Image: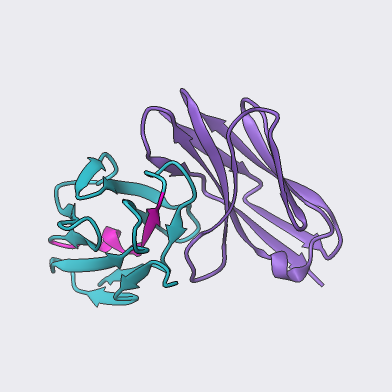
Chain colours: A purple, B cyan
Amino acid sequence: EDQVTQSPEALRLQEGESSSLNCSYTVSGLRGLFWYRQDPGKGPEFLFTLYSAGEEKEKERLKATLTKKESFLHITAPKPEDSATYLCAVQNTGGFKTIFGAGTRLFVKA
Amino acid sequence: GAGVSQTPSNKVTEKGKYVELRCDPISGHTALYWYRQSLGQGPEFLIYFQGTGAADDSGLPNDRFFAVRPEGSVSTLKIQRTERGDSAVYLCASSTTGGTGELFFGEGSRLTVL
């Protein structure tokens, strides 16, 4: 069964303190791995799609990378406005169900 | 353009009552998903539509839950004989690429069962 595990559950950073969020996944065949951002009371907002090991995507202070077993979301010099829950999700080649992890709650203090 | 619209935004009901939650996807999006999200958890897959048909309903927890999309656009999630454990935020998402790409989410319907 497809599974997504995210760590840590919560991460507290000072403004400017770079760090990484981890997403470990188990899937029989990976169609795509997705990163979303979710603010309180809102629906998830798409950030990146990664399709194959070695692929990297960047957007502002965020960079997502992918290996055969995990993905990392690197946050460089975060700002308080980066505070949110970051969700990782996978889609299996056998269908179109997108399975989400529990998320990492990021808090960035000024 | 308009995003995914979900109504109601909040619904409070009593145990045992029937509830309908509505999702209006982005125009032209053929794929539509329903998810359920409990506090502190990630979205839990319920059902996926491609057009009018339910292509994957493996996430529906039991036969009290049912969803329809009769004209391939608006979808309704129906919950019969609600239980306190059904309390959660119900999220709807749509996609333009047959479900293989980015999902566009609505803001959710918060259901509270007393």
Q: Identify the image quadrant of the C terminus of chain A.
A: bottom right
Which x, y percent locates residue B56?
Answer: 27, 39
Residue B94 is a magenta residue: yes
Which x, y percent locates residue A93?
Answer: 43, 28
A86 displayed left or right of B99:
right
Which x, y percent locates residue B86?
Answer: 27, 60
Residue drawn at point x = 49 percent, y = 69 percent: A42
Residue drawn at point x = 75 percent, y = 65 percent: A108
- Any part of residue A40 in sight: yes
**Which residue is nearer to you in this view: B5 or B89?**
B5
Query: Which of the 4 image quarters holds residue B84?
Result: bottom left
**Which residue is nearer to you in this view: A77 or A1?**
A77
A27 displayed left or right of A62:
left
Which residues are the magenta region? B81-96
Residue drawn at point x = 79 percent, y = 50 percent: A19
B67, above or below A34, in the image: below
A24, above or below B82, in the image: above
Number of marks in the rendered image: 0
Q: Identify the image quadrant of the N terminus of chain A.
A: top left
Residue B86 is a magenta residue: yes
A9 displayed left or right of B81:
right
Query: Which of the 4 image quarters holds residue B27?
Result: bottom left
- Any part of residue B34 in sight: no
A72 displayed left or right of A25:
right
Instruction: Pick out the residue farthest to the top.
Output: A28
Query: Which of the 4 image quarters holds residue A13?
Result: bottom right
